Amino acid sequence: MTHRITRRRTLQAAALLAAPTIVPSHVFGQDAPSEKVTVGVIGCGGKAFGGTRNLQGPGGCQIVALADPNRHGLDRYAGAFGVGKDRCYQDFRELLKLDEVDAVLVGTPDHWHVPISIAAAKAGKHVYCEKPLSNTIAEGQALVDAIKKAGVVFQHGTQLRSLAATRRACELVRNGYLGDVRKVIIGSPPGHAIGDVPAEPVPETLDWDMWVGPADPIDYRSCIVGGIPGRGPRGWYFVKRFSLAGWIAGYGVHDIDLAHWGLGLENTGPVKIEGRGDFPKSGLFNTVLGYELTFTYADGRQIEMTDTSKNRHGVKFMHENGKDWVYTRSRIDASDKKLLEPPLKDDDTRLYVSANHEKNFADCIRQGSIDTITPIEVAHRSTSVCLLGGICVDLGRPLQWDPVAQRFVDDDEANARLTCANREPWTV
């Protein structure tokens, strides 16, 4: 922990004499007996469970504190990861006050990602934030600035980068084994619709006002916090006040991230966005259902992104002949298996190798490196493309984008969508 290892030696001596149960790694610096990274988990729902397990297991971290407005989630995680009740909080700000916490896993709904991650960075905590990075592009820019200013390690939860198959596919593309790839075709899941859902009493175990946080107030419905009956996904993904672009960002950011990785477009964005989307006519859910989007970059290359009713779920890099392809998501495939055979040459570009996303985060903290496999700038750019797609289908017309200025070109209506007012005191 390079931002903390300058603590006075008296702290080290006191910690040794007291022999506490929890020994945060920053007390000892790189001389920690077990080099444990101590982690606080913020958002104890379904998505963060696997990440927390990986931090504790392959990552070799110690889970020392939990925060969630829902006490059911706190109780489940406390039992699973051995956290005492005195380190379980319904207000994440209490967790961030703990000096024993080195890093946080932010596994909340989308509308909380940036406010909590900024607060954590300001508190000197390293940040692992689940995808998508932000709800608006302005939020993403604010988090980029906060992470850089704090100098903490950041990892984005686009875990597909840490799979050998996805890295292999992207290396084949990067090194020209598919010729000049001009098009990538993505299939990503559609949204969901639901009818009108009446308001319900707030459970005694839930601090609903804290759960809603920076979003506009809304009456409690169990299907927002929990899964959609008979369909599984959490309902908040499909309510705009919590997830502005719906599953274009919530799911699609994984695939856009891989397309950028293969094409070498990780630090830029498209110059033109075109597309259409279908939305629920009525009911509680109001994010996009089916969609077709085309993102055109400055050099003419294109990423076509549709829902999975139109294209296979995953990322298909098209060969320059326009017919053959290499596909990846969690695995690799090709129109002709011979396309997968070429061995990389000594002078070929090699991409960052990570065998486990959470372990990569923990290892970077131990090594004093901020160079994770999915750093903050990359996370912001991949998320931004998805948010641009969400704005395009909302407005129902083509858009021109300046990826350097990160603004729409001569389009006040679209630029007004780059930000969203948060409720006090959660402004960014």
Image (tube, grey):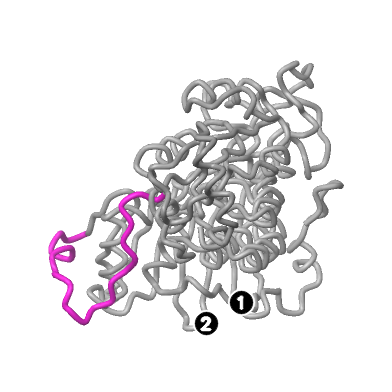
Q: Give the quarter of the figure containing the C terminus.
A: bottom right
Q: Which residue is at a point 68% across and 49% down the rendered structure image?
A: 244
Pick out the residue farthest to the right: 424
In magenta segment, residue 417: no
Q: Is residue 243 left or right of residue 331?
A: right
Horizontal and vertical percent position of residue 114: 67, 53
Chief secondary structure of the magenta portion:
loop
Horizontal and vertical percent position of residue 67: 64, 34
Q: Is residue 98 left or right of residue 268?
A: right
Horizontal and vertical percent position of residue 236: 65, 36
Q: Is residue 134 above or below residue 279?
A: below
Q: Which residue is at a point 81% across and 53% down the rendered structure image?
A: 427
Find disc 1 in the rendering and name its residue: 403
Location of residue 316 by image quarter: bottom left
Q: Which residue is at a point 52% across and 62% down the rendered structure image?
A: 2
Q: Are marks 1 and 2 in contact (CB under 8 Å)?
A: yes
Other residues around mark 2 within 10 Å, as few (<14) / some (14–19) / many (≥20): few
Pick whichever of labels 1 and 2 is earlier in the sequence: 2
Q: Nearer the viewer, mark 1 or mark 2?
A: 1
Q: Is residue 351 above or below residue 1?
A: below
For the record, the magenta segment spans 335-357
- Measure the C-alpha gap from mark 1 to mark 2: 9 Å
Disc 2 is placed on an element classified as loop
Which of the numbered marks, if any, corresponds to residue 86? none
Q: Is residue 21 left or right of residue 323?
A: right
Q: Amino acid at mark 1?
A: Pro
Tell me if residue 47 can be seen.
no
Find disc 2 in the rendering and name its residue: 298
* Front-lying residue, 290 or 29: 29
Q: Is residue 138 above or below residue 50?
A: below
